[in-house]
Image (cartoon, rainbow, N blue to C red):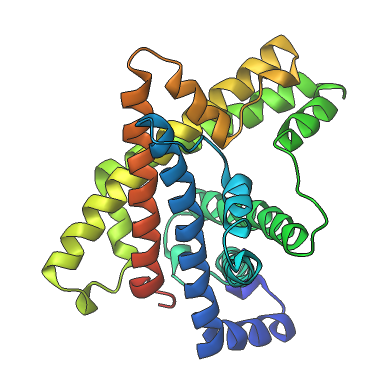
Protein backbone atom coordinates (compact mmCIF):
# COMPACT_ATOMS: atom_id res chain seq x y z
CA UNK A 1 0.00 0.00 0.00
CA UNK A 2 1.54 3.35 -0.97
CA UNK A 3 2.15 5.75 1.85
CA UNK A 4 -0.26 8.34 0.48
CA UNK A 5 -3.11 5.80 0.70
CA UNK A 6 -2.78 5.64 4.48
CA UNK A 7 -4.86 7.96 6.66
CA UNK A 8 -2.61 10.78 7.95
CA UNK A 9 -3.44 9.95 11.59
CA UNK A 10 -1.96 6.46 11.01
CA UNK A 11 0.80 7.40 8.58
CA UNK A 12 2.50 10.09 10.64
CA UNK A 13 2.95 8.09 13.89
CA UNK A 14 4.23 5.07 11.96
CA UNK A 15 6.69 7.19 9.98
CA UNK A 16 7.89 8.81 13.18
CA UNK A 17 8.41 5.41 14.80
CA UNK A 18 10.20 3.98 11.76
CA UNK A 19 12.58 6.96 11.66
CA UNK A 20 13.46 6.72 15.37
CA UNK A 21 17.10 5.68 16.00
CA UNK A 22 15.98 3.09 18.57
CA UNK A 23 13.73 1.42 16.02
CA UNK A 24 16.56 1.31 13.48
CA UNK A 25 18.80 -0.40 16.04
CA UNK A 26 16.07 -2.93 16.76
CA UNK A 27 15.64 -3.62 13.05
CA UNK A 28 19.38 -4.10 12.62
CA UNK A 29 19.38 -6.46 15.58
CA UNK A 30 16.70 -8.35 13.67
CA UNK A 31 19.01 -8.94 10.72
CA UNK A 32 21.71 -10.12 13.12
CA UNK A 33 19.28 -12.51 14.85
CA UNK A 34 18.26 -13.97 11.49
CA UNK A 35 21.93 -14.45 10.70
CA UNK A 36 22.51 -16.33 13.95
CA UNK A 37 19.57 -18.66 13.29
CA UNK A 38 20.73 -19.47 9.77
CA UNK A 39 24.30 -19.97 10.99
CA UNK A 40 23.10 -22.67 13.39
CA UNK A 41 21.01 -24.33 10.67
CA UNK A 42 23.92 -24.26 8.23
CA UNK A 43 26.49 -25.41 10.79
CA UNK A 44 24.43 -28.42 11.88
CA UNK A 45 23.77 -29.38 8.27
CA UNK A 46 27.47 -29.02 7.41
CA UNK A 47 28.42 -31.24 10.33
CA UNK A 48 25.93 -33.85 9.12
CA UNK A 49 27.27 -33.62 5.57
CA UNK A 50 30.91 -33.98 6.60
CA UNK A 51 30.27 -36.70 9.17
CA UNK A 52 31.25 -34.72 12.25
CA UNK A 53 27.89 -34.92 14.02
CA UNK A 54 25.03 -32.51 13.65
CA UNK A 55 21.77 -33.00 11.83
CA UNK A 56 19.57 -31.30 9.29
CA UNK A 57 17.08 -29.04 11.01
CA UNK A 58 14.92 -26.00 10.43
CA UNK A 59 14.88 -22.57 12.05
CA UNK A 60 12.82 -23.85 15.01
CA UNK A 61 15.39 -26.59 15.52
CA UNK A 62 18.09 -23.93 15.50
CA UNK A 63 16.32 -22.17 18.37
CA UNK A 64 16.20 -25.43 20.30
CA UNK A 65 19.94 -25.82 19.75
CA UNK A 66 20.56 -22.31 21.07
CA UNK A 67 18.47 -22.80 24.22
CA UNK A 68 20.33 -26.05 24.97
CA UNK A 69 23.66 -24.19 25.28
CA UNK A 70 25.08 -22.74 28.51
CA UNK A 71 23.14 -19.56 29.31
CA UNK A 72 20.85 -20.74 26.51
CA UNK A 73 17.71 -18.96 27.70
CA UNK A 74 19.58 -15.67 27.96
CA UNK A 75 21.07 -16.10 24.49
CA UNK A 76 17.71 -17.09 23.03
CA UNK A 77 16.07 -14.09 24.70
CA UNK A 78 18.46 -11.79 22.83
CA UNK A 79 17.76 -13.61 19.58
CA UNK A 80 14.02 -13.38 20.25
CA UNK A 81 14.21 -9.62 20.73
CA UNK A 82 16.00 -9.45 17.40
CA UNK A 83 13.39 -11.60 15.68
CA UNK A 84 10.63 -9.35 17.00
CA UNK A 85 12.58 -6.37 15.65
CA UNK A 86 12.81 -8.08 12.29
CA UNK A 87 9.04 -8.72 12.28
CA UNK A 88 8.35 -5.05 13.01
CA UNK A 89 10.77 -3.95 10.29
CA UNK A 90 9.09 -6.23 7.75
CA UNK A 91 5.72 -4.73 8.68
CA UNK A 92 7.13 -1.23 8.22
CA UNK A 93 8.53 -2.27 4.83
CA UNK A 94 5.12 -3.65 3.83
CA UNK A 95 3.15 -0.59 4.92
CA UNK A 96 5.38 2.48 4.73
CA UNK A 97 7.82 1.53 1.96
CA UNK A 98 10.79 3.23 3.69
CA UNK A 99 13.27 2.00 1.06
CA UNK A 100 11.40 3.54 -1.84
CA UNK A 101 10.16 0.40 -3.60
CA UNK A 102 7.08 2.40 -4.49
CA UNK A 103 9.13 3.99 -7.25
CA UNK A 104 8.97 0.69 -9.14
CA UNK A 105 6.01 -0.42 -11.23
CA UNK A 106 2.75 -1.25 -9.47
CA UNK A 107 2.86 -5.04 -9.90
CA UNK A 108 6.40 -5.35 -8.57
CA UNK A 109 5.57 -3.06 -5.65
CA UNK A 110 2.56 -5.17 -4.68
CA UNK A 111 4.52 -8.44 -4.91
CA UNK A 112 7.36 -7.04 -2.79
CA UNK A 113 5.04 -5.77 -0.09
CA UNK A 114 3.08 -9.01 0.05
CA UNK A 115 6.42 -10.79 0.41
CA UNK A 116 7.35 -8.54 3.33
CA UNK A 117 4.02 -9.26 4.99
CA UNK A 118 4.39 -13.03 4.56
CA UNK A 119 7.91 -12.79 5.98
CA UNK A 120 6.57 -10.89 8.99
CA UNK A 121 3.98 -13.60 9.61
CA UNK A 122 6.54 -16.40 9.27
CA UNK A 123 9.01 -14.79 11.67
CA UNK A 124 6.18 -14.02 14.10
CA UNK A 125 5.66 -17.78 14.34
CA UNK A 126 9.39 -18.25 14.92
CA UNK A 127 9.31 -15.62 17.69
CA UNK A 128 6.41 -17.46 19.32
CA UNK A 129 8.38 -20.71 19.18
CA UNK A 130 11.30 -18.94 20.86
CA UNK A 131 9.08 -17.60 23.64
CA UNK A 132 7.69 -21.10 24.26
CA UNK A 133 11.23 -22.47 24.56
CA UNK A 134 12.32 -19.70 26.93
CA UNK A 135 9.28 -20.15 29.18
CA UNK A 136 9.61 -23.93 29.14
CA UNK A 137 6.23 -24.54 27.56
CA UNK A 138 7.59 -27.01 25.06
CA UNK A 139 8.22 -26.47 21.38
CA UNK A 140 6.29 -26.63 18.20
CA UNK A 141 6.83 -29.75 16.15
CA UNK A 142 8.02 -29.83 12.59
CA UNK A 143 4.61 -31.12 11.50
CA UNK A 144 2.91 -27.73 11.77
CA UNK A 145 3.14 -27.13 8.02
CA UNK A 146 1.69 -30.60 7.43
CA UNK A 147 -1.18 -29.85 9.81
CA UNK A 148 -2.05 -26.68 7.92
CA UNK A 149 -1.72 -28.45 4.60
CA UNK A 150 -4.05 -31.21 5.79
CA UNK A 151 -6.64 -28.63 6.84
CA UNK A 152 -6.52 -26.94 3.45
CA UNK A 153 -6.68 -30.25 1.59
CA UNK A 154 -9.86 -31.09 3.48
CA UNK A 155 -11.57 -27.95 2.16
CA UNK A 156 -13.33 -27.48 -1.19
CA UNK A 157 -10.73 -26.61 -3.82
CA UNK A 158 -8.11 -27.40 -1.18
CA UNK A 159 -5.84 -29.18 -3.63
CA UNK A 160 -5.84 -26.11 -5.88
CA UNK A 161 -5.01 -23.83 -2.96
CA UNK A 162 -2.13 -26.03 -1.79
CA UNK A 163 -0.90 -26.41 -5.35
CA UNK A 164 -0.97 -22.64 -5.82
CA UNK A 165 0.94 -22.20 -2.58
CA UNK A 166 3.54 -24.68 -3.80
CA UNK A 167 3.83 -22.80 -7.07
CA UNK A 168 4.35 -19.54 -5.16
CA UNK A 169 7.06 -21.06 -2.96
CA UNK A 170 8.74 -22.54 -6.03
CA UNK A 171 8.55 -19.11 -7.66
CA UNK A 172 10.22 -17.59 -4.61
CA UNK A 173 12.99 -20.16 -4.89
CA UNK A 174 13.54 -19.36 -8.56
CA UNK A 175 13.51 -15.64 -7.79
CA UNK A 176 16.36 -16.23 -5.34
CA UNK A 177 18.43 -17.70 -8.17
CA UNK A 178 17.70 -14.56 -10.19
CA UNK A 179 18.66 -12.32 -7.27
CA UNK A 180 21.90 -14.24 -6.82
CA UNK A 181 22.72 -13.95 -10.53
CA UNK A 182 21.98 -10.23 -10.86
CA UNK A 183 23.32 -9.29 -7.39
CA UNK A 184 20.83 -6.42 -7.29
CA UNK A 185 20.61 -6.91 -3.52
CA UNK A 186 23.70 -4.70 -3.31
CA UNK A 187 21.42 -1.71 -3.88
CA UNK A 188 20.13 -2.25 -0.34
CA UNK A 189 23.54 -1.50 1.15
CA UNK A 190 25.07 1.82 2.15
CA UNK A 191 27.90 1.17 -0.31
CA UNK A 192 29.58 4.52 0.36
CA UNK A 193 30.30 3.34 3.92
CA UNK A 194 31.85 0.03 2.82
CA UNK A 195 35.41 -0.63 1.75
CA UNK A 196 36.09 -2.28 -1.60
CA UNK A 197 36.87 -5.56 0.17
CA UNK A 198 33.62 -5.40 2.15
CA UNK A 199 31.63 -4.75 -1.01
CA UNK A 200 33.29 -7.70 -2.77
CA UNK A 201 32.64 -10.13 0.05
CA UNK A 202 29.10 -8.86 0.62
CA UNK A 203 28.39 -9.62 -3.03
CA UNK A 204 30.01 -13.06 -3.00
CA UNK A 205 28.45 -14.17 0.27
CA UNK A 206 25.07 -12.78 -0.76
CA UNK A 207 25.12 -14.60 -4.09
CA UNK A 208 26.18 -17.91 -2.56
CA UNK A 209 23.77 -17.64 0.36
CA UNK A 210 20.75 -16.47 -1.62
CA UNK A 211 21.31 -19.17 -4.26
CA UNK A 212 21.41 -21.79 -1.48
CA UNK A 213 18.09 -20.51 -0.18
CA UNK A 214 16.83 -20.83 -3.74
CA UNK A 215 17.71 -24.53 -3.71
CA UNK A 216 15.89 -25.09 -0.43
CA UNK A 217 12.78 -23.10 -1.35
CA UNK A 218 12.55 -24.86 -4.72
CA UNK A 219 12.58 -28.24 -2.98
CA UNK A 220 9.96 -27.13 -0.45
CA UNK A 221 7.75 -25.72 -3.22
CA UNK A 222 8.10 -28.88 -5.29
CA UNK A 223 7.02 -31.14 -2.43
CA UNK A 224 4.13 -28.80 -1.61
CA UNK A 225 2.91 -29.18 -5.19
CA UNK A 226 3.37 -32.96 -4.89
CA UNK A 227 1.24 -32.90 -1.74
CA UNK A 228 -1.49 -31.14 -3.73
CA UNK A 229 -1.33 -33.61 -6.60
CA UNK A 230 -1.47 -36.64 -4.30
CA UNK A 231 -3.77 -34.98 -1.75
CA UNK A 232 -1.34 -36.17 0.92
CA UNK A 233 -0.11 -33.68 3.51
CA UNK A 234 2.69 -36.05 4.52
CA UNK A 235 4.51 -35.09 1.31
CA UNK A 236 5.16 -31.60 2.69
CA UNK A 237 8.76 -30.86 3.63
CA UNK A 238 10.13 -28.15 5.86
CA UNK A 239 13.60 -26.63 5.76
CA UNK A 240 15.28 -29.43 7.69
CA UNK A 241 13.58 -32.12 5.65
CA UNK A 242 14.47 -30.36 2.40
CA UNK A 243 18.11 -30.49 3.46
CA UNK A 244 17.69 -34.18 4.31
CA UNK A 245 16.33 -34.78 0.79
CA UNK A 246 19.56 -33.38 -0.61
CA UNK A 247 21.56 -35.81 1.50
CA UNK A 248 19.60 -38.73 0.02
CA UNK A 249 20.55 -37.91 -3.55
CA UNK A 250 23.59 -39.24 -5.47
CA UNK A 251 26.62 -37.38 -4.10
CA UNK A 252 24.25 -36.29 -1.35
CA UNK A 253 26.95 -35.43 1.15
CA UNK A 254 28.51 -33.04 -1.34
CA UNK A 255 25.16 -31.48 -2.24
CA UNK A 256 24.19 -31.05 1.39
CA UNK A 257 27.63 -29.72 2.26
CA UNK A 258 27.54 -27.09 -0.48
CA UNK A 259 24.06 -25.88 0.46
CA UNK A 260 24.95 -25.95 4.17
CA UNK A 261 27.99 -23.77 3.51
CA UNK A 262 25.70 -21.54 1.45
CA UNK A 263 23.39 -21.11 4.44
CA UNK A 264 26.39 -20.20 6.58
CA UNK A 265 27.34 -17.68 3.90
CA UNK A 266 23.78 -16.33 4.06
CA UNK A 267 24.10 -15.97 7.83
CA UNK A 268 27.25 -13.83 7.40
CA UNK A 269 25.48 -11.87 4.67
CA UNK A 270 22.65 -11.18 7.15
CA UNK A 271 25.20 -9.85 9.65
CA UNK A 272 26.52 -7.55 6.92
CA UNK A 273 22.92 -6.41 6.37
CA UNK A 274 22.69 -5.66 10.07
CA UNK A 275 25.58 -3.25 9.69
CA UNK A 276 25.12 -1.73 6.25
CA UNK A 277 21.48 -2.15 5.18
CA UNK A 278 20.01 1.12 3.94
CA UNK A 279 16.99 1.48 6.19
CA UNK A 280 15.45 4.69 4.88
CA UNK A 281 15.58 6.54 1.54
Q: Is residue 128 left or right of residue 47?
A: right
Q: Quadrant of residue 68?
A: bottom right
Q: Choose between 94 and 214: the one closer to the eye.
A: 214
Q: Where is residue 222 drawn, in percent x and y?
A: 54, 22
Q: How many marks?
A: 0
Tell me which residue sits at (34%, 46%) in the image.
209
Horizontal and vertical percent position of residue 184: 29, 54
Q: Residue at x 35, y 37 (%)?
A: 177
- Left or right of 193? Residue 241 is right
Question: Is 156 on the left-hand or right-hand side of 5?
Answer: right
Relative vertical location of residue 91 with respect to residue 121 in this rendering, above or below: below
* Quadrant for the C terminus in the image: bottom left
Q: In this rendering, does residue 174 appear at all?
A: no
Residue sticking out furthest to the right = 155
Residue 35 visible in the shown view: yes
Residue 32 x, y percent position in the rendering:
46, 67
**Residue 253 x %, y %:** 36, 24
Q: Residue at x 74, y 86 (%)?
A: 9
Residue sitting at 20 percent across and 58 percent down? Answer: 201
Amino acid sequence: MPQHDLPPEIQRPMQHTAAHPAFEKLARLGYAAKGIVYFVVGLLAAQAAFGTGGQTTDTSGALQEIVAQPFGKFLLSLVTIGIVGYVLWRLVQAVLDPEGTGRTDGAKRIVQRIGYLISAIAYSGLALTAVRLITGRGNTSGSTSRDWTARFLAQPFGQWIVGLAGLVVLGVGLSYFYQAYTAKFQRQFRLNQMTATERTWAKRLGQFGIASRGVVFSIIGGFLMLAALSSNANEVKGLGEALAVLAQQPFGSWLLGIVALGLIAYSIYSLIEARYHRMMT
